[in-house]
Image (cartoon, rainbow, N blue to C red):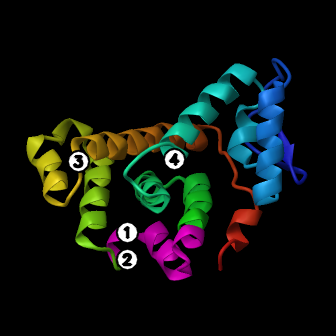
Amino acid sequence: MTTSGKPTTALTIEQVDDLTDRQQAYFNKCTEKLGFIPNVLTAYAFSSVKLQAFADLYNDLMLGDSNLSKLEREMIAVAVSGVNQCYYCLTAHGAAVRQLSGDPALGEQMVMNFRAADLDARQTAMLEFADKLTRTPHAVVEADRQALRDAGFSDRDIWDISSVAAFFNMSNRMASAVDMRPNDEYHAQAR
């Protein structure tokens, strides 16, 4: 699939089926709100089943009910994507951090190294946990969860932090595997 005449991924996959009415409405909403359809969605659009599964999980984790703010969830996405060096997600979610925070410098600091950003103790604890879960998931122990509790997170919050981090580890690997390219529009957003 291509957008703006450029390939979305390095793969050419035959279209399995058409978008459902619900998916077309979602694409229309993206175009209305963002001015474009994110390439991650067009990449999955070869299969309405795969697109719907991805979109439902993403929307639940990133926009659904949680004590974590949208900005905090985007910060997790950027921290995980930084560890994984995922160009697509660093570009797209770095733009979201810039936009949600109103601070272009924070977005850039997060993309380069979240430890360079001026974060509070709560945010730092959250991102250190997401970093450890990404780098050495087998080494996460009760002391790591307790550090989050000590920073003010509930057990439900710990679930949400873990879910967002896990999702972006999967998403980063898919984006890297298929050389998913970010939309050009992300580069200029919230600067």
Task: Please indicate whether residue 126 sits to the left or right of residue 20 in the image.
Answer: left
Task: Please indicate whether residue 99 sits to the left or right of residue 12 in the image.
Answer: left
Quadrant where the N terminus sits is: top right
Measure how far apart labels 3 and 2 are at the Cα level: 24 Å
- The residue beneath circle 3 is 154
- Front residue of 21/55: it is 21
Residue contact at pointers 4 and 1, CB within 8 angstroms: no
What is the three-letter code of the residue carrying label 1?
Phe
Above or below for 44 versus 3: above
- The residue beneath circle 2 is 117
What is the three-letter code of the residue carrying label 2?
Ala
- The residue beneath circle 4 is 62
First of labels 4, 1 by sequence position: 4
- Front residue of 101/45: it is 101
Q: Is residue 36 visible?
A: no
Task: Please indicate whether residue 50 sits to the left or right of residue 114 in the image.
Answer: right
Measure how far apart labels 4 and 3 are at the Cα level: 18 Å
Mark number for residue 90?
none
First of labels 1, 3 by sequence position: 1
First of labels 4, 2 by sequence position: 4
Q: Is residue 162 visible?
A: yes
- The residue beneath circle 1 is 114
Of badges 4 and 2, the one in the foreground is 4
Residue at the left extreme?
A: 143
Picture coordinates of residue 12 (x, y %)?
Answer: 79, 31
Give the crowd class for mark 4: few <14, some 14-19, many >=20 residues within 10 Å: many
Q: How many numbered discs sit on the rendered protein?
A: 4
- At x 76% / y 64%, what residue is drawn? 185
